[in-house]
Image: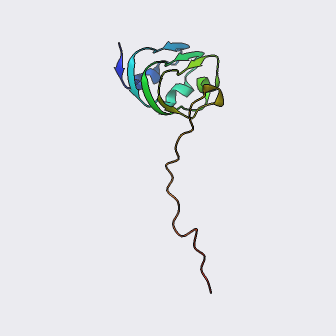
Amino acid sequence: FFQGIIPSTFITLKGLQKLDLSQNNLSGEIPKYLAMLPLQMLNLSYNSLEGEVPVGGIFYNVTGLSVLGNKGLCGGMPQLNLPLCNSRKMPEKGLDHKRRS
């Protein structure tokens, strides 16, 4: 019955190999530091996580990662079948107009 964000204190668990936080009420973004841990299995399924799935580490292991049931997630490796993330870049002004001499 965990709720809220995934705590930043997990980064101190350097020997953590398996982490199952599925079927809780976790929200917010998946912390990027999880990609730096030596995880062999990460299950974040059926929470309320949102934003872009991090890259690297466990996030490249299709057999060790599950993020099912988090409707707000995007990006990640293609095998996750998540929608592409919206680019938040603003178009640069003035690129469509050429100066005439």
* Labels in figure, total: 0
For residue 21, what is the image quadrant? top left
The way the protein has been coloured in the rendering is rainbow
Position above or below: 22 against 5: above
> x, y percentage for residue 69?
48, 21
Position above or below: 11 against 18: below
Q: Nearer the viewer, residue 38 or 43?
A: 43
For residue 35, what is the image quadrant? top right
> x, y percentage for residue 37?
55, 22
> x, y percentage for residue 19?
50, 14
Position above or below: 12 against 91: above
Identified at 44% across, 21% down, the residue is 10
Q: Nearer the viewer, residue 83 or 77?
A: 83
The quarter of the image holding the N terminus is: top left
Q: Nearer the viewer, residue 6 or 82?
A: 82
> x, y percentage for residue 57?
61, 26
Identified at 58% across, 68% down, the residue is 95
The quarter of the image holding the C terminus is: bottom right
Position above or below: 72 against 62: below
From the viewer's perspective, tell me whether residue 47 is left or right of residue 65: left
From the viewer's perspective, tell me whether residue 93 is left or right of residue 101: left
Q: Nearer the viewer, residue 17 or 70?
A: 70
